[in-house]
Amino acid sequence: MDIKTKEKFLALWKKYFKNAELPITFYYTEGDGGAIWAEKPKVRSCLICELAKVRNGRSLVYNAERIRCAGAKRYLGYSEKMRPGFEYFLSCGNEETEGERYLRSPELVKEFMKIQQTLPADGKNIVFKRWDNLSEKDDPDAVIFFVKPDLLSGLFTLANFDQSEPNGTFTPFGAGCGSIIHYPYLESRSERQRAVIGMFDPSARPCVPEDTLTFAVPMKRFEKMISYMEESFLITETWRTIRKRLT
């Protein structure tokens, strides 16, 4: 991690976004990144809820044993297995399981799962750190913001500042952890490197405030966003008007 980039963003974030919550980051590694090992949950636990600790400044590292949610294990690349009857669980349910009804039919779920990609996480750990806790030894794959609408507006517009094609961001269907880890990681390995707007998963919503969504962007793309912040709309009266009401 380039410390100059880290400090530059901290200064510009303060300048244009006041005291808004800092983003968190993640990356896969064979070590622990100097983070604290997450506790092994005794019962099923949503990763989005656990990341509140990282948002508050505690650096955590996970592996497959420290994630109890089957969906999170799959979205983070630690397993390709699905619970028996998953196509019914995600859709209409059956006599053995109550359906979440997120997709209309079991057949639609099967088609959806055919196009899902897995992450190369086998044998690796995943480290989560808030931006201000990053060190020179860290190498983030992506940056994750938990944001209210005004902040989302600013990040969304900034991400499209150097784009001629209008879809510099996208909003894929999936679990909450998919929107902040799975898809941003895949984008970090792509040529386009789009940002991902997420946290629309009703199952994950109880883990974030009611007015909060997420904006996740590959690190290389984020470095470009930092580089042109001071020539963007952020220096205009339009943004100054919005900045006044940021808390």
Image: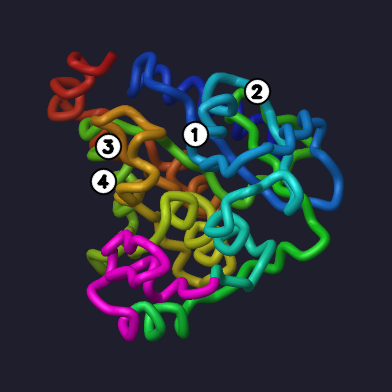
Whether residue 39 appears in this view of the structure is yes
How far is mark 2 from mark 4, CA to CA? 30 Å
Q: How crowded is mark 1: few (under 14 residues within 10 Å), some or many (20 or more)?
A: few
Task: Of the two numbered discs 3 and 1 on the same chain, state the one appearing first in sequence.
Answer: 1
* Picture residue at 58% right of the left edge, 25% below the top: 53
Q: Which amino acid does label 3 sit on?
A: Gly
Task: Of the two numbered discs 1 and 4 on the same chain, state the one appearing first in sequence.
Answer: 1
Q: Residue 157 carries which label?
A: 4
Q: What residue type is labelled 2?
A: Arg
> What x and y, as percent, mark residue 81?
62, 72
Q: Name the residue under label 3.
A: 154
- The image shows residue 68, relative to residue 106, as above or below, that is above
* Picture residue at 36% right of the left edge, 71% below the top: 95
Q: Residue 58 carries which label?
A: 2
Q: Name the image quarter holding the C terminus.
A: top left
> In the picture, residue 96 is in which quadrant?
bottom left
Query: Is 149 within the magenta?
Result: no
> Depth check: 120 or 221 in front?
120
Q: What element does badge 1 sit on?
A: helix
Task: Of the two numbered discs 2 and 4 on the same chain, state the one appearing first in sequence.
Answer: 2
